[in-house]
Image (cartoon, helix red, strand yellow):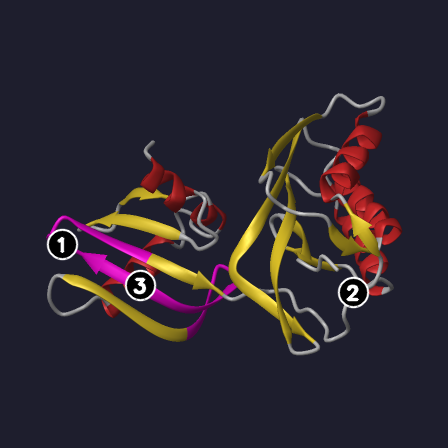
Amino acid sequence: MNFEQKLIEHDFNPFVLFSSDGKILSLNEQAQFIVNPFNSKELFELATTYASVSFGFKTTFIDLEFSQQKFFGLTVGYENEQEIGIKLYQTPSFKLNNKKPTGELTNIYTLVDLCISTNSINSQVHFLKDFDPTIPEVIVDSNSFIKILNKIYSCFMQNDEISTKIYYRIGEHIKFENKKYSLFSIEISAKNKDLNKINELQNLIDVSSIHVDIQHKISINVPMITS
């Protein structure tokens, strides 16, 4: 897989390449969560409906819901009669309030490693890590963060493997006091979730200022506030 293919594979937005008869030729990681044998025909129909009249690429901004996820637009492209590709632009499902987070300047990797270590004790679960090493120290409420992250891990402890990814949310930001801040996420994922634990997690989120997105994966979304 070359660099360009890796960028597509790890894109936050779903991408699917179809053959001319609607068969899936390839799809990225994000698309695997929304496409299945029962709805691929619907997505193919979206691609053919919003494709340009002639060869090329066409972007359309439209509110749509596909496989219980919301999107604000799509790009469809084709350069021959054999293949057609579609990319959906996912609407961020989490909302950040207007109150600037408080806490202390913290090394986020240290907190995440601490939680992984804690949850590894007396457990056979294999913890996988994919960390962007360039996230600086940020201001965060460490106590709330640790409680929520530990609860997130508890939602997945029935699995053999749990993945943790730390990455920048490219192109996304929030304003506090007229100053713009970038965002990054700590994303936890595994095959299965404990729904009872999800309810407990939601109760913790409701009384904290930590912003969490619960979907197939669970993400803690953090503003890049360094002072």
Q: Residue at x 37, y 74 (%)?
A: 61
Tell me which segment is drawn in magenta.
63-86
Mark 2 closeness class: few <14, some 14–19, many ≥20 residues within 10 Å? some
Percent coordinates x, y for residue 63 in the rendering: 44, 75
In terms of secondary structure, where does tag 3 sit?
strand
Q: Residue at x 11, y 53 (%)?
A: 81
Quadrant where the N terminus lies? top left
Q: Is residue 64 magenta?
A: yes
Q: Is residue 47 visible?
A: yes
In terms of secondary structure, where does tag 2 sit?
loop
Marks 1 and 3, how far apart at CA: 14 Å
| Image vertical order of residue 50 relative to residue 115, above or below | below
Q: Is residue 205 magenta?
A: no
Quadrant where the C terminus lies? bottom right
| Residue type at numbered disc 2 | Pro
Label annotation for residue 101: 2
Q: Main secondary structure of the magenta part?
A: strand
| Residue type at numbered disc 3 | Thr
Q: Does 2 sit left or right of 97 as displayed?
A: left
Q: Earlier in the sequence, mark 2 or mark 1?
A: 1
Q: Is residue 196 visible?
A: no
Q: Residue at x 54, y 63 (%)?
A: 172
Mark 1 closeness class: few <14, some 14–19, many ≥20 residues within 10 Å? few
Marks 2 and 1, how far apart at CA: 48 Å
Q: Earlier in the sequence, mark 3 or mark 2?
A: 3
Percent coordinates x, y for residue 224 in the rendering: 66, 58
According to the picture, the residue beneath numbered tag 1 turns out to be: 79
Q: Residue at x 81, y 45 (%)?
A: 151
Percent coordinates x, y for residue 104 in the rendering: 84, 54
According to the picture, the residue beneath numbered tag 3 turns out to be: 75
